[in-house]
Amino acid sequence: MQEKIKKLENTLVPLEGKRVAIVCDWIKDWWGAELVLSHLLEIFPKADIFSSVFFQKNNPVFKWRKITTSFIQKIPILNKSHKLALTLRPLAFESFDLSEYDIVISSTSAESKWVITKPETLFICYCHTPTRYFWSHFHEYLWMMEFWILNFLWKTLAPKIIHNLRSWDFVASQRPDFFIANSINTKNRIKKYYKREANVIYPWIEVENFKLNTKKENFYLYVWRCIPYKKFDLIVDSFNKNWKKVILVTNTDNKLYRELKWKSKENIIWKLNISRKKTRDLFTNAKAFLFPPEEDFWLVPIEAQAWWTPVIAYSSGWALETVIEWKTGIFFEEQTVESFNQAIEKFEKLKFDSVEIREQAEKFDKKNFQKKILSFIEEKLLK
């Protein structure tokens, strides 16, 4: 695979001999943003990595990579919580010395676009979303930052702290030479909050690795981090009421996870920290994948469709760009138990064409991502 990418790079003369750095907000778990990072690393096999913290030492993706972390890596507790380290993160990213690199790519939904580069360095921000807790979801995060005994103090101080950080974030958003958005929804938010234009290049999955399974089983599936805006609570409340079987997969063992698991009835099955292979098996066998949050971008619903699995999604944001209603899934209009359960009842009366579901996933094949990213960089280097 790397040989193929090298050949692709070598066809782009402006990239020859260029030193590339990829900057990430943090590298802790293995979800959507980390998958995009792995995709970028496949395109740029010699790129160095910069991140506020790094906790994926056993992941083969990072074998032999030069990885530079910030001073936050050495601070216990804060190194495991980017929220608690909020006020340190501007200093962390501005402390990175990127002066020896010709191309810097920030893959970010938070603060890694805050790095400082030389005037002659091509600085591209691949943006998953303008920082949620500064902008679009500030009021929601005000009540769900999970600071436990410090929650009261946070709610008192947050408006002032976030006001200052929001100003810093806007200033930092002017540093990249160009923005790439992972979706139209993100592009619109970049325009609104940062006053910047962005090209849209969708992330990818390796569709050819997803094989057909027509023997769907009688359960629904949801896979993600168990944090408030992912709406695990909506699923638990809905399935506590409808008594249908659902499997919830997460690697987040926190207070919310334990509370929701405690209140779940026996038809709700939780899977904590299971292997990627077991998760794939669940995707293959599920009758439908659930997508209840409002997301700017998320690869998992595309993965579900690559497994010929339809999606039941909240009618907002990224879902509108990835799910075709009545063909690859259906929507529900409100994030309420009633609206969600009505959609599930509707879904159970419908039939879906597996071929149409698969064809939708193929639009996000990695070849498109690779070609567009490299062409974009080539074009900007030639200007």
Image: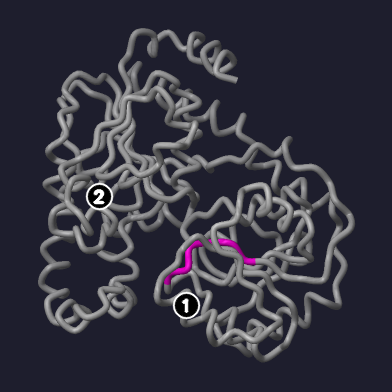
Magenta part of the protein: which range? 222-227
In the image, residue 225 lies in the stretch drawn in magenta: yes
Disc 2 is placed on an element classified as loop
Q: Position of residue 250 (x, y in %)?
A: 54, 63
Q: Position of residue 178 (x, y in %)?
A: 32, 36
Give the residue displayed 65% in from the left and 68% down from the top.
290
Disc 1 is placed on an element classified as helix
Q: Main secondary structure of the magenta part?
A: loop
The reply to whether the C-beta atoms of the residues labelled 2 and 1 are less than 8 Å apart is: no
Colour mapping used in the image: one colour
Q: Who is closer to the viewer here, 121 or 262?
A: 262
Residue at label 1? Answer: 258
Residue at label 2? Answer: 111
Q: Position of residue 204 (x, y in %)?
A: 58, 40
Tell which circle, 2 or 1, labels the residue nearer the N-terminal end: 2
Q: Who is closer to the viewer here, 66 or 298?
A: 66
At label 1, the amino acid type is Arg
